Image (spheres, coloured by chain):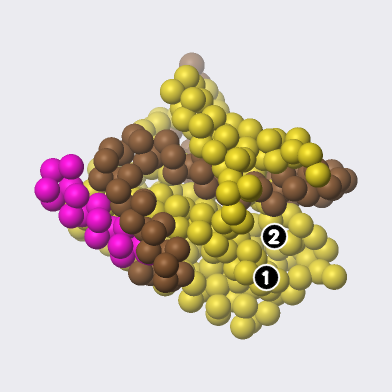
Amino acid sequence: MVELSGPAWSAVAIGLMALVTYLCRIGGILLMSRVSVTPRIARALRALPGCIVAATILPVALASGLAASLALAAAVAVMAIVRHELAALAAGLGTVALARAVGL
Amino acid sequence: MAAPYTPAGCRHGARLCLPLTPGLLVFGAAFGTAAAQKGLSLWEAVGLSAFVFAGAAQMVALELWREVWTPSTLLGIAVLTATINARMILMGASVQPWMRGAPLAPTALTLFLFTDASWLIGTRYQAERGNDLGVLLGAGVALWVLWVVSTVPGYLAGSLVTNPRAWGLDLVMPIFFAIMLVPLWRGMSRALPWAVAGVVALAVQALVPGYAYIVAGALAGAAVEALRDG
């Protein structure tokens, strides 16, 4: 077995992770610049941000329990009313801290 | 016409990161602490934050970190990083129309600094008819500085962040994600793709270990919108 020890190989690991991450960052741009955007693809692209958000938070909300679900609901409600990120974030964090403090 | 990068846009983007600052500092410090506990040097911890700049991937990579590497462990950490960060491919695709024709150098830098948070900030800004790519760049720079700087005290102090969970700080990013549904909301008739995305993500998360669920759910939702008539 090849053994690669020393700080230089940790730097290689960091470099590999950085390279792979940058490829993910530019991958969607490169891909879409080679696709001709039909009306269907344009619609899908417009729907994509909301879909990414939904696919990210729904599993988290259910996996993190009732406190997390209440916090997300409170944050969305405050955002819908006042349209201010900081207020909504504070409402969400306040809700989860309170809910966990009382043992939810 | 190509979207511009203006200094005013950069400043605006940096300002939009303000609500995230406390949570980001705590998470950067938590990563520094975890890296110290796993035996990384300070330079390795800071190097990960500076060059990889992806919180979830950095945290998980610590679980695979080695004193002695082999070609297969190096490959393993690269593949794991790709699976965690694959969601960025979709985020990039969603901002591609905005970046079309933009100058290469600032766009390459903006993409190096592209994260969930700057994508959310940029998407919100664009949903409200903003067109200045400086917002995306400025947000990226601000988040990068905060992330890299916060890694150091976390590494050195060790127990700076004892229990972020008690304060709900593990939910900062999920909450920030959820908030973004409000400016993106275009009425019930446009909500079906979101519902499909959420349900498919849940199903994939239950069936497939790892991080495929975000990409699978988001693609399913976008496909539903593409197949809709009219």
- Across and down, in percent, residue A16 comes to 57, 40
Write down the quadrant of residue A89 in the picture: bottom left
Horizontal side of residue B223 vs A51, given as left or right: right
| Residue in the picture at 51% in, 54% down | B181
Q: Secondary structure at mark 2?
A: helix
Where is residue B186? Give x, y as percent: 61, 56
Q: Chain for mark 1?
A: B
Per the model, the C-alpha gap separating discs 1 and 2 is: 23 Å
Provide the secondary structure element on which disc 1 rests: loop
Q: Colour of chain B?
A: yellow
Rendered position, B127 above or below B218: below
The residue labelled by disc 1 is B129
Part of the protein shown in magenta = A88-104
Chain to which the residue tagged by mark 2 belongs: B
Using residue A39 as the reference point, say whether residue B219 is left or right of it: left
* Residue denoted by label 2: B108
Quick one: label 1 or label 2, which is nearer the N terminus?
A: 2
**Location of residue B142 in the rendering, given as x and y in whole percent from the top left corner:** 49, 69
